[in-house]
Image: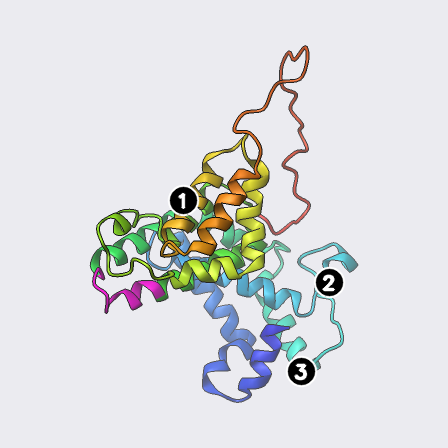
């Protein structure tokens, strides 16, 4: 729906022309595939974001529940002229393979090109180069963009160590020394940390999930708590909320049940029915 609204709003604007031209969309996709085949590069985030755009194109006309086949178009009511364009674009990209090109690019970006490691490194580099109060607007904007990518990645990427590590850096996890060294931002709520806390969906996917896994998985939850506190300018309300969250998380260790012998593995524990996820 967002894609259709964007195209309809932009109308004949030159900046919207590519998304309304199936051949152009197909050409952009070919460029992304070529860049993905070329190995790690600054284009890795763009490759992943393009996989998300492909999903939006597909979902604008296709209902997986109806046909169960991610490569078969199934038109639905809406703006017929736009739906036809997106259907044509998708079918050009899929061709005769009937594969899911969005998932293919996402796997390549995440597993082969190390998307989240790349994002974390970019943020660290920006923090190193733009280390004065004026220039921090640049790295803050970059962290905001990457936070949006992290949020959107939930459609394709499972909760895990790599995405958590990137999130910690994006929230400012590498700047633990600022508070103790009298940094000029001391006492100021980091805008990216505020965006994270104000976004209920992000909190649910990462913070609530980390809390639910605590204490079996302790470091993700404790690291998120520490990072948030350090980047909220020691805001009293936020610090208190975090402390209460930790206090209500139960014991750090749990007692084993009576006559415990060993753990049982559930083969379906990590099963995921979403065909798009990596």
Residue carrying label 1 = 226
Residue 176: % across, % down: 30, 47
- The boundaries of the magenta stretch are 130-140
Q: Nearer the viewer, mark 1 or mark 2?
A: 1
Residue name at image x 76 percent, y 57 percent: 65
Q: Residue pushed farthest bottom? A: 12
Q: CA distance from mark 2 to mark 3?
A: 18 Å
Q: Are marks 2 and 3 in contact (CB under 8 Å)?
A: no
Of residues 14 and 218, the one nearer the viewer is 218
Residue 123: % across, % down: 32, 55
**Sooner in the amino-acid sequence: mark 3 or mark 1:** 3
Residue name at image x 75 percent, y 72 percent: 76
Q: Is residue 2 visible?
A: yes
**Sooner in the amino-acid sequence: mark 2 or mark 3:** 2
What is the secondary structure assignment of the residue under circle 1?
Answer: helix
For residue 63, the mark is 2
Decide: few, some or many residues near mark 1? Use Cα within 10 Å; few <14, some 14-19, many ≥20: some
**Sooner in the amino-acid sequence: mark 1 or mark 2:** 2
Q: Is residue 126 above or below residue 83?
A: above
Residue 115: % across, % down: 41, 51
Task: Give the quarter of the figure containing the N terminus.
Answer: bottom right
Decide: few, some or many residues near mark 2? Use Cα within 10 Å; few <14, some 14-19, many ≥20: some
Q: Are marks 1 and 2 in contact (CB under 8 Å)?
A: no
Residue 85: % across, % down: 62, 77
For residue 81, the mark is 3
Q: Nearer the viewer, mark 2 or mark 3?
A: 2
- Left or right of 275: which side holds 67? right
Q: CA distance from mark 1 to mark 2?
A: 42 Å
Q: CA distance from mark 3 to mark 1?
A: 51 Å
Residue 273 part of the magenta segment? no
């Amino acid at each position: 729906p967002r894609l259709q609204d964007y195209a309809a709003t932009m109308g004949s604007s030159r900046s919207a022309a590519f998304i309304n031209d199936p051949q152009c969309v197909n050409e952009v996709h070919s460029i992304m595939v070529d860049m993905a085949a070329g190995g790690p590069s600054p284009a890795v985030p763009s490759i992943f974001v393009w996989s998300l755009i492909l999903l939006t194109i597909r979902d604008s006309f296709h209902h997986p529940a109806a046909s169960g086949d991610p490569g078969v178009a199934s038109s639905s009511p809406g703006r017929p002229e736009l739906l036809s364009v997106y259907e044509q674009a998708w079918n050009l990209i899929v061709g005769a393979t009937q594969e899911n090109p969005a998932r293919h690019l996402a796997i390549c970006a995440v597993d082969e090109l190390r998307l989240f490691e790349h994002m974390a490194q970019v943020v660290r580099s920006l923090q190193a180069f733009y280390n004065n109060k004026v220039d921090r607007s640049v790295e803050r904007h970059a962290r905001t963009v990457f936070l949006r990518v992290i949020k959107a990645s939930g459609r394709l990427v499972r909760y895990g160590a790599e995405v958590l590590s990137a999130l910690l850096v994006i929230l400012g996890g590498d700047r633990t020394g600022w508070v103790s060294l009298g940094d000029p931002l001391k006492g100021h709520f980091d805008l990216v940390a505020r965006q994270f806390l104000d976004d209920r969906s992000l909190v649910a996917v990462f913070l609530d999930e980390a809390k639910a896994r605590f204490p079996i998985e302790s470091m993700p939850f404790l690291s998120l708590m520490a990072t948030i506190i350090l980047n909220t300018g020691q805001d009293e309300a936020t610090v208190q909320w975090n402390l209460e969250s930790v206090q209500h998380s139960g014991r750090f260790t749990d007692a084993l049940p009576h006559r415990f012998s060993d753990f049982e593995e559930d083969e379906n524990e990590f099963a995921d029915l979403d065909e798009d996820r990596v």
